[in-house]
Image (spheres, rainbow, N blue to C red):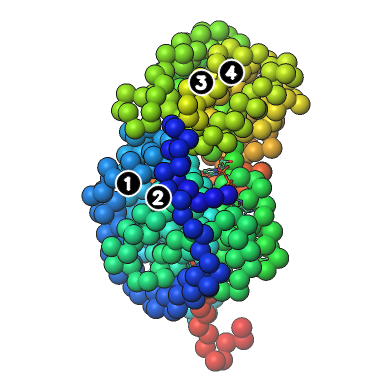
Amino acid sequence: MAIQTINPSTNQVVKTFSEMSPEALEAAVAQAETAFGTWRKTSYPERATLLHEVAVLMREHKEQLAQTISLEMGKLIAQARAEIDLSADIFDYYGTYAEGFLADKVLHPEAGEAIIRSSPVGVLLGVEPWNFPFYQVARFAAPNIMIGNVVLVKHASNVPQCAIAIEELFKNAGAPAGVYTNLLLSGARASELAADDRIKGVALTGSEAAGSSIASVAGKYLKKSTLELGGNDAFIVLEDADIDKTVEWAVIGRMNNTGQCCVAAKRLIVVEAVADEFIAKFKQKLEVLKVGDQLDGDTELGPLSSEQAAADIARQVQDSVDAGATVLLGGHRIDREGAFMEATILTDLKPGMVAYHEELFGPVASFYRVANEEEAIKLANDSSFGLGGSVFTSDIERGKRVADQIDTGMVFINHPTWTAPDLPFGGTKRSGYGRELSGLGIEEFVNKKLIRVSALTDPF
Ligand code: NAP
């Protein structure tokens, strides 16, 4: 894939970048390894100073950075600004709390002393997706740099200016060369790079295909990986939910980032008693969304990230319709230049149809009616993915009981699946393994080293 900025509202190429030469890549890896030797010896306060400074610079340049996100992958400008705020918060969060998370853990053996010390492991490779070009990088870079690891980041090929801007932020914040390095590389070369002995761990956020490619290399060369992959989250509405409020959340949950969130509310599963009211109100809200350029503050439905993304989702919808699904709203590309897709609602979906099984990464909601709570849970779990999900009910204890029976990494009650620096994020099944964010997210690439002190005379 060419490394290019293409404005998805016009499909015009704005700027093209060259991939790194093999020599430049070798120099970047060597520099990262050298940097690790020094960075691992810095104190937590020194590392925290760097992260807080990155956060300061991000907020200072918020408008320019948000415009870059919006231009390159089509996010509505207000949501791009919110992404910068959230990313800065993640840097601050780890700057503030990492030392506590990584503090020595004192054990209490029968004799002598024992502690578990958190040590860095070395140079890490992060492969990141375009859908949240700053936030995804923050989730990986902030905790690992606080541990004392150093990071090489291969970003998605359609967000090169975002990728370069993040590296610049680190540089301007005073990061020593090699602590944070952007790699302008193809996906295939990133997988090859994972084999390099100097790389001690790999984290990928993206599709199942990319995850499988890089994790198989990591496995072959005996290094740890984490995978944050796709999802097909259920948004369950029970009969005792407040329907008006729930519909508002369903619109946000499905349409945020033009539907291109791994944890978007992709499957709306509504019990029969409230299904008609829910879907009528949901449809009313979707059909009036104002379509337009992502940089126009009045736009409510912008383009998808690329022409390919729009073509892919239109094909998934058409395949499902050909197999018997019903279109309640939309169903087609929007007749204008750019990567636009109509806000769409599909129903009458059955096993075997594309839209039943595959992730729909765009403004297309799948609507299912079920008889009761039990059927809702069964349907929610009938997915190869296991990322997030949500349950809407006025009975919180009931919501918790339902949440307990859903096989995913995250379940939210009375809110679509969401994110915050202090909440762990990640999935099960084909949505991947490992966690990012919170205290859990800093544990992935750490050597939990046991240091044991015995008296020379102790038997053990
Ligand atoms: P993608 O094609 O897998 O791209 C993601 C990253 O992987 C890009 O940097 C891409 O580089 C790289 N890549 C592609 N092929 C590769 C390979 N063989 N080896 C190594 N790296 C490779 O994913 P996408 O379709 O653009 O992104 C959307 C997907 O990410 C969705 O499925 C979404 O649900 C998932 N996602 C998951 C989470 C989560 O936290 N679970 C969060 C956000 C997104 P190029 O751009 O150069 O191809």
Label 3 sits on residue: 334
Amino acid identity at mark 4 = Gly
Which residue sits at x=36%, y=54%?
165
Residue 336 % position (x, y): 48, 22
Dot 1 surroundings within 10 Å: few (below 14), some, or many (20 or more)?
Answer: many
Per the image, label 2 sits on a secondary structure element best described as helix
| Circle nearer the N terminus (3, 1) | 1
| Circle nearer the N terminus (2, 3) | 2
Amino acid identity at mark 1 = Leu
| Circle nearer the N terminus (2, 1) | 1
Per the image, label 4 sits on a secondary structure element best described as loop
Which residue sits at x=43%, y=64%?
181
Residue 324 placement, left or right of 362: right
- Look at the image and tell me whether residue 312 can be seen: yes
Dot 3 surroundings within 10 Å: few (below 14), some, or many (20 or more)?
Answer: some
Residue contact at pointers 2 and 3, CB within 8 angstroms: no
Query: In the depicted view, which residue is nearer to us: 357 or 166?
Result: 166
As drawn, 24 above or below 398? below
Residue 412: assigned label: none
